[in-house]
Image: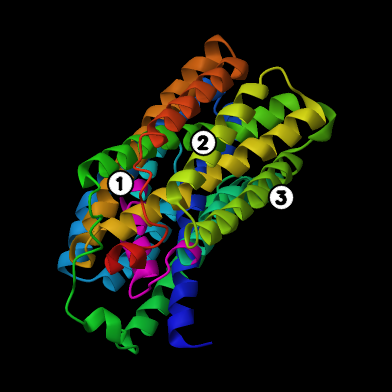
């Protein structure tokens, strides 16, 4: 394996860990902590909110530091810092301590997206597939959070679900420090930075406004579905899910299958209009979320796979559009703004899930999310039809 591929592998594993760290608590709260601490699911999940707020807010200083200091250095800080905070979370004995520890984890987890994604596309011409592959790893982290946590709950206890990922992340951080200390920057990264492609005749502010609006709305849908899915399956799969491990397996396979949609979308983005692809993905989201209310058993499982395919399929579209528009010299800060919007929406989704579930149940939540997906579709229809399929197409003009 070349050092460039090894570096790409570290970035992909980092994305896996980033999403795993942020969702371990969701499964812990749903499957065991409510019983151990004598609190309802709705009472527990707001303690995750500080971590998700930090996940969004601290993306901007992380992106600024990466642009001004070192993107590779910030990645090492991510691996080691997030690992240490995960171990710290395992020591929590009260809900308040849990909230503080999750906040600290969110601060370090915020580093990945504004730093890792620009590193993924650094020096590349076609960015759709690299972003899609990296996105698959992130989604497998989402999927594995429920699987690994469920297994460790059944066999070792919920605290181990935080300890083991933390130890692995610290080890990877030390290995990454060795890699970057012995590897020179790639030639393209040392060249004079140039501005990103200009979209002749296309109002850039209009495109950015749509990107950030759909990012916020997509963040609500993504967070609500990924965070709540362990509890949804616990309630709706009945005899299909008789233990925490089984719930974890179902969540894992739903997310793993859904992650494949990113590879399809990434392939299409390098060859076809991003607008047309976005329209199809948004329409599928709205359709399958609207079908979900009232379903149980195998039907609920099948439709969950369908709407998660569409939810995950949206993720690389926004990143590819930003990568084509943003100059390399300030790309980390633009991605930081994108993820502040995303993760602010994620944080706002946490109390919404608790409130809707406590008062009406998950059927009302799916109805609301179908409406949000409909708004995404309306926004995407306002994108310019003349948008090029690839960055080079615009540059050639």
Front residue (pair 306, 246): 306
Provide the secondary structure element on which disc 2 rests.
helix
Most extreme residue toward the top is: 359
> Quick one: which residue is furthest to the right in this view?
239
Q: Do we see residue 100 in this rendering?
A: no
Task: Please rate how many residues cluster around mark 3, counting C-alpha atoms within 10 Å: few if below 14, some from 14 to 19, many from 20.
Answer: few
* Residue drawn at 39 percent across, 68 percent down: 120
Q: Earlier in the sequence, mark 1 or mark 2?
A: 2
Q: Nearer the viewer, residue 266 or 158?
A: 266
The numbered dot on residue 218 is none
Residue 282 has which mark? 2
- Where 137 falls versus 179 (above or below)? above
Element type at mark 3: helix
Q: Residue at x 76, y 37 (%)?
A: 243
CB contact under 8 Å: marks 1 and 2? no
Q: Say the numbered circle drawn on residue 155.
A: 3
- Residue 27, how many percent across, how many down? 59, 39
Q: Which residues are magenta?
A: 106-129
| Mark toward the start of the polypeptide (3 vs 1) | 3
**x, y (%) of residue 361?**
60, 15
Percent x, y for residue 305? Answer: 68, 40
Q: Is residue 100 left or right of residue 226?
A: left
Up the image or down, 373 lies above or below 263; here it is above
Residue 338 image label: 1
């Amino acid at each position: 394996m070349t050092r460039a591929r090894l570096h790409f592998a570290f970035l992909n594993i980092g994305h896996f860990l980033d999403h795993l760290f942020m969702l371990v608590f969701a499964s812990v709260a749903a499957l065991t902590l409510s019983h151990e601490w004598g609190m309802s699911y709705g009472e527990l999940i707001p303690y995750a909110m500080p971590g998700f707020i930090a996940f969004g807010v601290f993306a901007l200083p992380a992106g600024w530091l990466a642009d001004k200091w070192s993107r590779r250095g910030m990645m090492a800080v991510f691996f080691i810092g997030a690992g240490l905070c995960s171990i710290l979370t395992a020591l929590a004995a009260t809900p308040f301590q849990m909230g503080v520890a999750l906040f600290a984890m969110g601060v370090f987890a915020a580093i990945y997206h504004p730093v890792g994604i620009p590193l993924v596309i650094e020096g590349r011409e076609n960015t759709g597939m690299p972003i899609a592959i990296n996105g698959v790893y992130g989604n497998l982290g989402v999927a594995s959070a429920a699987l690994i946590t469920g297994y460790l709950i059944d066999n070792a206890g919920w605290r181990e679900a935080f300890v083991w990922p933390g130890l692995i992340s610290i080890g990877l951080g030390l290995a990454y420090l060795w890699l970057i200390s012995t590897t020179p920057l790639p030639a393209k990264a040392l060249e004079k930075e140039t501005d990103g492609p200009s979209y002749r005749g296309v109002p850039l502010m209009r495109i950015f406004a749509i990107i950030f609006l759909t990012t916020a709305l997509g963040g609500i849908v993504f967070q609500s579905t990924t965070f709540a899915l362990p509890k949804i399956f616990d309630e709706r799969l009945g005899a299909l899910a008789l233990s925490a491990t089984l719930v974890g397996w179902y969540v894992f396979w739903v997310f793993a299958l859904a992650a494949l949609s990113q590879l399809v979308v990434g392939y299409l983005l390098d060859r076809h209009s991003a607008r047309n692809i976005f329209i199809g993905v948004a329409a599928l989201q709205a359709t399958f979320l609207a079908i979900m209310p009232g379903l149980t058993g195998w039907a609920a499982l099948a439709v969950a796979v369908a709407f998660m395919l569409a939810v995950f399929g949206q993720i690389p579209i926004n990143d590819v559009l930003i990568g084509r528009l943003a100059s390399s010299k300030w790309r980390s800060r633009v991605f930081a703004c994108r993820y502040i919007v995303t993760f602010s929406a994620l944080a706002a989704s946490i109390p919404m899930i608790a409130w809707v579930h406590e008062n009406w149940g998950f059927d009302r939540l799916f109805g609301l999310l179908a409406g949000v997906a409909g708004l995404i579709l309306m926004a995407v229809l306002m994108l310019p039809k003349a948008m090029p399929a690839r960055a080079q197409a615009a540059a050639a003009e």
